[in-house]
Image (cartoon, rainbow, N blue to C red):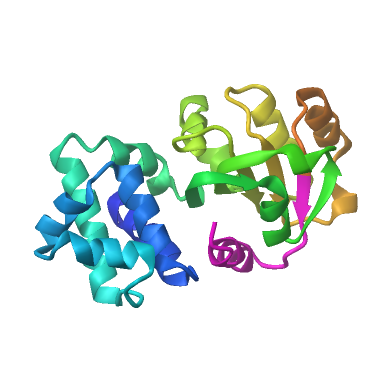
């Protein structure tokens, strides 16, 4: 599967799983920087239809409409250089990125922690931390396949985000990678281990870098990704 198809699949999953699919459609249209009138023209419909979907005045779009909507976003972007597609799909072919989301408005870190059933290991005053996105990362593939330059791609369009690592046994490797690269995430979530199993060095690095460290208690990786998508950020 190509990176474009993976990107399209991820966007489709976010739209269809959301309680407010129209808002998610609007978010991605604005991320791609495409006006309502332009996407409506390419779809052969009026701008009011797009507006009605995005505002919730019209019932949720069907799968076929969502597919055409996403394909139009991607094809329109490619015609103008493909900068947005490149930004989001640079690392998808490696399989290291399991999910990546961008928010149009800041989301409290506590909402992300709640969505992943997280236990805070390091961090105070998290009610003051806001996030603009998150990336779910297969930690084993990231370690084996990503260069330092590739690692930067984990931050999507905004570094004010949560990096969520799955298949974690101790937490040392992700935190070492974060320590030696830039930029830094706002919070780190580890999945695949018990809170009491977090390596002492990982905890020390989190404290030195002033990065809140959280352990997700959700059992399965698939459940983690689904829970985040259904949270409707």
- Determine whether, in the image, residue 188 is placed left or right of residue 11: right
58 over 231 or under it: above or below:
below
In the rendered image, residue 144, in percent from the top left (x then y), is placed at: 55, 39
Q: Nearer the viewer, residue 180 or 81?
A: 81
Q: Position of residue 114 (x, y in %)?
A: 73, 59
Image side of residue 122 versus residue 181, left or right: right
Q: Say which of 10 and 16 sits in front.
A: 16
Left or right: residue 192 compared with residue 50: right
Magenta stretch in the rendered image: 214-233
Image location of residue 20, percent across then percent down: 46, 67
Name the quarter where the C terminus is drawn. Answer: bottom right
Task: Residue 70 in the image: state x and y as whole percent.
Answer: 27, 59
Q: Determine the residue positioned at 27% across, 34% down.
A: 83
**Residue 154 can be seen, yes or no:** yes
Question: Taking the image as drawn, is residue 171 in sight?
Answer: no
Q: Is residue 9 left or right of residue 125?
A: left
Which is more toward the observer, 210 or 99? 210
Reply above or below: 107 against 57: above
User: Is residue 88 inside the magenta stretch?
Assistant: no
Q: Quadrant of residue 191?
A: bottom right
Asked if residue 216 lies in the magenta stretch, the reply is: yes
Residue 46 sits in which quadrant? bottom left
Vertical arrangement, residue 101 with respect to residue 123, above or below? below
Q: Residue at x 22, y 52 (%)?
A: 36
Q: Residue at x 73, y 50 (%)?
A: 110
- How many numbered callouts? 0
Where does the N terminus fall, quadrant-wise? bottom left
In depth, the one of 207 and 145 nearer the eye is 207
């Amino acid at each position: 599967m190509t990176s474009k198809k993976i990107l399209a699949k991820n966007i489709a999953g976010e739209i269809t799983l959301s309680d407010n699919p129209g808002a998610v459609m609007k978010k991605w249209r604005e991320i791609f920087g495409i006006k309502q009138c332009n996407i409506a023209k390419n779809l052969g419909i009026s701008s009011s239809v797009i507006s009605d979907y995005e505002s919730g005045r019209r019932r949720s779009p069907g799968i076929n409409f969502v597919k055409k909507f996403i394909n139009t976003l991607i094809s329109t972007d490619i015609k103008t250089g493909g900068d947005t597609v490149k930004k989001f799909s640079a690392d998808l072919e490696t399989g290291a990125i399991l999910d990546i989301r961008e928010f149009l408005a800041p989301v409290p870190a506590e909402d992300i922690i709640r969505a992943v059933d997280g236990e805070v290991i390091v961090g105070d005053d998290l009610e003051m931390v806001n996030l603009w996105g998150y990336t779910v990362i297969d930690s084993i593939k990231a370690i084996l396949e990503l260069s330092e330059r590739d690692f930067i791609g984990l931050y999507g369009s905004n570094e004010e985000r949560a990096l969520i690592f799955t298949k974690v046994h101790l937490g040392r490797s992700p935190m070492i990678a974060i320590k030696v690269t830039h930029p830094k995430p706002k919070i780190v979530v580890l999945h695949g281990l018990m809170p009491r199993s977090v390596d002492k060095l990982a905890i020390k690095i989190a404290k030195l870098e002033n990065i809140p460290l959280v352990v997700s208690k959700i059992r399965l990786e698939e459940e983690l990704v689904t829970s985040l998508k259904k949270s409707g950020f």
